[in-house]
Image: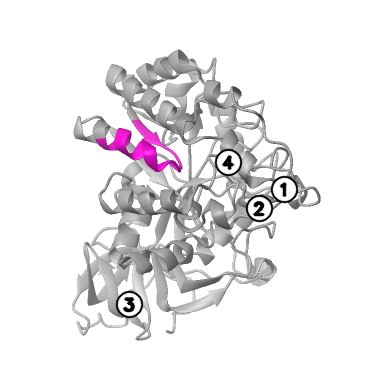
Amino acid sequence: MTVPNGDELSDIVIRALRAVVGERERACAVFLRDGRISAVENYDASAPEGAREVVLAADEVLLPGLVDTHVHVNEPGRTQWEGFATATRAAAAGGVTTIVDMPLNSIPSTVDVAALEVKRKVASEQVTVDVGFWGGAIPGNLAELEPLWNDGVFGFKCFLAHSGLDEYPPLDREQMVDAMRTIAGFGGLLIVHAEDGPTLDARTRPAGPRYDDFLHSRPPVAESRAVAQVVDGVRRTGCRAHILHLSDAESLALVAEAKAEGLPLTAETCPHYLSLFSEEILDGSTHFKCCPPIREARNREALWRGLADGTLDCIVSDHSPCLPELKKFSSGDFGEAWGGISSLQLGLPVVWSEARKRGHGLVDMVRWMAGRTAELVGLGDRGSIAVGNVADLSVFAPDDAFVVFPERLHHRNAVTPYAERALAGVVRQTWLAGRPLAVTLDAARDPAPRGALLRRKESL
């Protein structure tokens, strides 16, 4: 594959023997003009006079750029954990062209317009891919929700249990319902970390290196009780709601029943729940710690079935990095270690490695990691290769493979449970608005970042 040089946006034609277009793979020529897709034609369609042509290799597949709606960038305030520069470079290297940043882990949390403006100011001039923002719903900020919505956030995140950070407290059941009523009043979206606080509080707090102790401290019933609360709140208020990072397969029935009832509820899961399983996690291996936890292999298989039947809508990274010392590697103490997994750059190959074993194809991958995530946040002009869409694309070699070496990742901190794992599928190129992105391990030599900061569209 060769790519055009220069930054000018002239006509470009990308020819691919395989491309995911709509709900099928096909050979095609994708025409780009002024940063958007102007046509999708047969592979050998004539190029406009003066157009530059890019011909993909026989082993490469053209995909839309992925849309990851669950990313903790952590800047400002905890930039040493990640930051917009490193997070968006990692996204680009992984075929992700749009991320939506979570409202917590940064200081201040994005719970009012002033905090949102601080985050936008810090992010500007740094982002390699496009970035949008979630707002937060915490006790006492009901009056801030509509102003945040009007200023362009894509929805509001709440916890039903302690977030791990005292500055971002959870909502109790009635506070959640009050937030839902407020959000429903202006047609917004509530996204929920669905673990039930009282259930977790009644459990013995984990201490020490045993993974089983940590797993038992966050049981499946904590998720199912919280999901039931969300369903009840949606039923009472009509608020659109989305279940974040569902790890408990037993909760799938609750989501399916709510959908069958016609309630406006969606749900996601993550690469680590679809690839890892508790039986393989050695005691003291705190790089596997996340909340909710990675559960048993049989639970993993049930999550795959939930994706296949449509109960689960999408796959997102829940990229939640931290400093290496916060993982408590010296003690391996699951009670003290930070809970979060860095996978923004690796999501596509991690999921593809598992999906193809279960008979899923690249059309499924695009649906789960681009189309439905774009739909969740109302970004109708991305997430698919279609005329009029932003020309955000990725070039993926599904039959190539690589070994994960943490020091070769663009994440700020080289901590990952995927270290030294062989993964199928290599992202060879990422395009943003009709231009190829040059991302190398030497950031100082790369072109200036040119991602955009996104605001919610009125069509939501």
- Give x and y (percent) for residue 111: 55, 27
Q: Residues within 10 Å of mark 1 (few under 14, many from 20)?
A: many
N-terminal of the two: label 4 or label 3?
3
Marks 2 and 1 sit apart, C-alpha to C-alpha, by 6 Å
Marks 2 and 4 sit apart, C-alpha to C-alpha, by 14 Å
Q: Are marks 2 and 1 in contact (CB under 8 Å)?
A: yes
Asked which secondary structure carries label 2, the reply is helix
N-terminal of the two: label 2 or label 1?
2
Marks 4 and 3 sit apart, C-alpha to C-alpha, by 48 Å
Residue 66 lies, with reference to residue 187, above or below; the image says below
From the image, which quarter does the N terminus lie in? bottom left
Mark nearer the viewer, 3 or 1: 1
**Residue 363 visible in the snapshot:** yes
- Give x and y (percent) for residue 456: 39, 39
Question: Looking at the image, which residue is at 20% across and 30% down?
Answer: 261
Amino acid type, mark 3: Ile
* Disc 4: which residue: 215
Q: Which of the labelled discs sits on residue 14, or is there none?
A: 3
Question: Looking at the image, which residue is at 21% across and 83% down?
Answer: 46
